[in-house]
Amino acid sequence: MKEEKKFKSPGLIVFFILLFMFFVSVTSMAGDSAIRDEMPHITAGYSYLTKGDYRLNPEHPPLIKDLAAFPLLFIKPNFPTEHWQSQINDQWSEGEEFLFKSGNNADLMLFLGRLSVVLLSLLLGYFVYRWASELYGIKAGIFALVLYAFDANIIAHSRFITTDLGIAATVFINLYFLWRFLKEPSKKGLLFVAITLAIALLTKFSAPILVITYALVALYLIFRPKPLEKGSLLFTRFYNSDFVRRFLGYLFTFLLIGIIALLIVWVVYAIQTINMSPEIFHKSIDAGIDSASTRSMLHKLADIPILRPLEHYILGFLMVQQHATGGHMAFLLGKVSNGWWYYYIVAFFVKTAIPTMIFIASSIIFWIGRRNNKDHRAKVILLVPVFIFIFFALTTKINLGIRYLLPIYPLLYVFVSFIASKVSLKSIKDFSFKNINFNAAFSVVFFFLMIWYIIFSLRIYPYYLTYFNELAGGPKNGMYYITDSNIDWGQDMKRLAKYVDENNIGKIRVDYFGGADPVYYLDGRFIPWQADKIPEKGYYAISVTYFQQARAENQYQWLGNRK
């Protein structure tokens, strides 16, 4: 209790940490041009809100796109309706037309759209603090929040219109309410779980991972044996002898939650597709699915008017699964391939801060050594989805960046937060090399790691997407490990244009991987370029992602070791 009293105004501390996060997110994103995925997302969202038609980007649920597009309703940008009407899911061309070729202010539109993701990130930060503090006290809550708010990967993806931060936030918040509900069951609690589950399902098609999480958590709570008593080996006894009642109770409770969530998803999709004709539903199926049998099944669902909204949700989910099975060409450690099982292992160890990895390792050691685990239910709810995300990361062929592991970080930060209770300022004051005790030594190391963590987070500003830890050699060497959204996602086109202006460069050959239109920023100075072209004398700007993939295939060798 004495330690807790030191935090007289924890709300004020939380406010300033989140305010800092808001500041660095907003000021750093202002310099970033459109990244690869933003162009279709914001365009699709605006079309949903203004047209009631879901022909664009069905492979992602609507929530983040709608939130990003909502501020645009107030500035009423020009929308290329004629182009939109003539195509089915021509999301890239439509996005380019909407942002850069219709007389709109692309930078203003992106800035307004990104604000909604920044605010969602702040909401997630608040819930990280809230869960950790409710479990282990205010000190743990502030520790978890600092880990979250200064995480370069979190900040990087808090500033873009993509589903990655969104799914991290909605999964975490849903699991928090699940923990609260299992701790103190109530009708209100059940409703919160169902609503937040629906929100997660409307964010990204990886959200069904929550269904697996629910099933495994329920099995754990049903089968968990009583704690060992002295002189007893009763591992096989259940908390409640009425096993069937417990099983049916969890089954019907989670089924009810699922039904409510599914109804919410159906209503949202019904609104988003309200003006879609049956013909567009069927054309979307033919354009999105390769398997004839799957297309036939979806066509049958689309023939039933009341089921069309759910059919469109299923269509998007199946498109993602098709992509995951087919894979995606990616770069890893000097090679290009359609996927590696160990890609995300490498990504985690080069993109995660070293202090974070030390905190995770030490918390596991402390946890194993603890005799009394009153927080066992929370630990299960926190760790089960982490292992599920890791499992799918090891089995998918979509190797595009650490962003696919983003949901595990907030969960891990709450998991490790209990070690903050072992830290004491008093023990640091009493620290002496002549008489070292564990608490003092741990507290000194803890604060050293926190200072290290915060300093290196500040040093990467404003280039958060390019963060690599010190073992990887930092941002300068990151490109030799992994590329794409880990370092170069097209965010530097505005900076390139500024460089060209400042150096009076008349023409520049650009091989660009990103979502911005080079002509929009460079005008007539832009010359499109590709790796297979014969070199010419002049200036070149080559995206790291394309550069490394080309070098792995023995192209761009003529550039040598030029920066």
Image (spheres, rainbow, N blue to C red):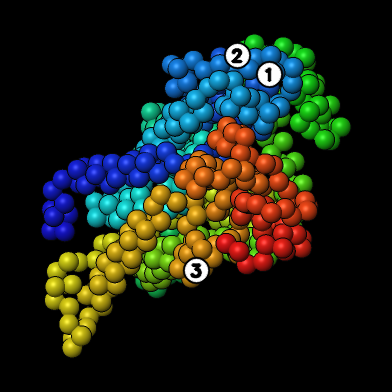
Amino acid bearing label 2 = Lys
Pointer 1: what residue? 84
Callout 3 secondary element: loop
Q: Write the residue at 57% across / 27% down.
A: 99
Q: Quadrant of the N terminus?
A: bottom left
**Tag 3 near tag 2, CB within 8 Å:** no
Which quadrant holds residue 319? top right
Give the Cα distance between marks 2 and 1: 10 Å
**How far apart in space, not on screen, are marks 3 and 2 (Cα)?**
48 Å
| Crowding at mark 2 (Cα within 10 Å: few <14, some 14-19, many 20+) | some
Q: Are marks 1 and 3 in contact (CB under 8 Å)?
A: no
In this orientation, which residue lies closer to the viewer: 314 or 259? 314
SS assignment at label 1: helix
Quadrant assignment, res 39: top right
Q: Which residue is mark 2?
A: 51
The kind of residue on which mark 3 rests is Gly
> Can the viewer see residue 367 in this picture?
no
Residue 17 is at least partly visible in this image: yes
Q: For numbered disc 2, what is the local secondary structure?
A: helix
- Report the mark closest to the observer, 2 or 1: 1
Is residue 340 found left or right of 161 in the rendered image?
right
